[in-house]
Amino acid sequence: MAGDTAVGAREPRWAAATFGFVLFLAGSVGTWLCWRYFVDTYEGQLVDDAALRGSVIGQNLLWRAAEPVLDVVSVSFVVLVLSAAALIAVMRRRLLLAIQVTVLVGGANLTTQTLKHTLLERPQLAETGGALANSLPSGHTTVAASVAAALLLVVPRGIRPLVAVLAAGYTATTGIATVIGGWHRPSDAVAAVTVVLAWAGLTAMLTALVSPEWHRPGPPAGRSTAVAAGLLGAGGLAGGVLAAAALLRIRNLVAMGDVTPALMPRQDLATAYVGGALGIAAVTAVVYAAILLAHQFASHDPERSRPRAGASMA
């Protein structure tokens, strides 16, 4: 029977792999939709520009907190965090996972740079205050999101829920900081997070199909995973509703031609700015909830959690 169990444990987890593939598709489509509306339409450019113009509100004070967050992001930072993630994976005897997270970080950042500088363009459809060159997705946010996702994937199952919450907080803070500094529009940060979602989905697929992690016994961490995913999902939903309300208000203003962002009252610019920040936070929260659930599902063998027949229930 032991041999049968070992053989069965090596069968691919197709349901978990499908979940990972769905995340890959969601991330890919989400990135394209961000570009298609906020960059490739007149209306979207004006909505995004309103949020960027609103970033000057309280910037002197907010930049004191945002600048150190952005200063951390560098090549040495990526190397350091990725090395730490790979070391954790190796210490857990997860050599394949060390390769997976390296591919995740490298692939996500290469994708962002390729999309931003080669594949995606920013047509001049509206008079906006930002740079004319395409800035979607945000490089800084991609770095933050990818290294945070890498750490989430390599830590033991029991602490992944906590790491997921911290990773979401760090990523959202970095994305919002790029808007505070006037470096990026909100859509740039959102697209960066969805790029990482796509690569994390591919990682979950590999974990489900070929990773040995779920062959080994370990705590399912079901309750803490549900709590963390629930908190992130609820926070993302609440933030998303508020962000959508702000976006619709600004969209209606520019769609009716009542006012352009350059002539908008301060309170409307503030609405666009806060709405953009909430949008970044909301998408980030939902994305990390999805990554957490996908990887926990992909790496958990339910057969290992069931007591063997005749085993003591004490």
Image (spheres, rainbow, N blue to C red):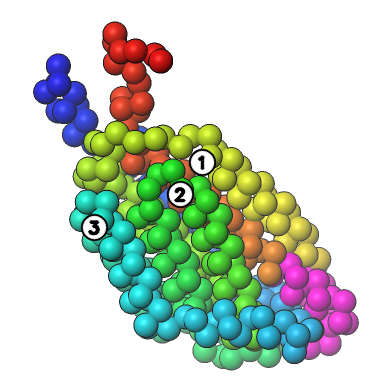
Q: Position of residue 251 (x, y in %)?
A: 75, 69
**Picture quadrant where residue 313 is located:** top left
- Looking at the rendered structure, the kind of residue marked 2 is Arg
Could you tell me which quadrant the C terminus lies in?
top left
248 relative to 207 in the view: left or right: right
Which segment did they paint magenta?
Answer: 250-276
Q: Is residue 154 visible?
A: yes
Instruction: Give the mark nearest the N terminus, 1 or 2.
Output: 2
Residue under pointer 3: 90
Other-residue count near label 3 (Cα within 10 Å), few / some / many at <14 / 14–19 / ≥20:
some
Please name the residue shown 52% across and 89% down the image: 133
Q: Secondary structure at mark 1?
A: helix
Q: Which residue is mark 2?
A: 160
Residue at 68 percent across and 86 percent down: it is 64
Quarter holding the N terminus is top left
- Describe residue 251's horizontal placement relative to residue 292 as left or right: right
Disc 2 residue crowd, few under 14, some 14–19, many 20+, Cα 10 Å: many
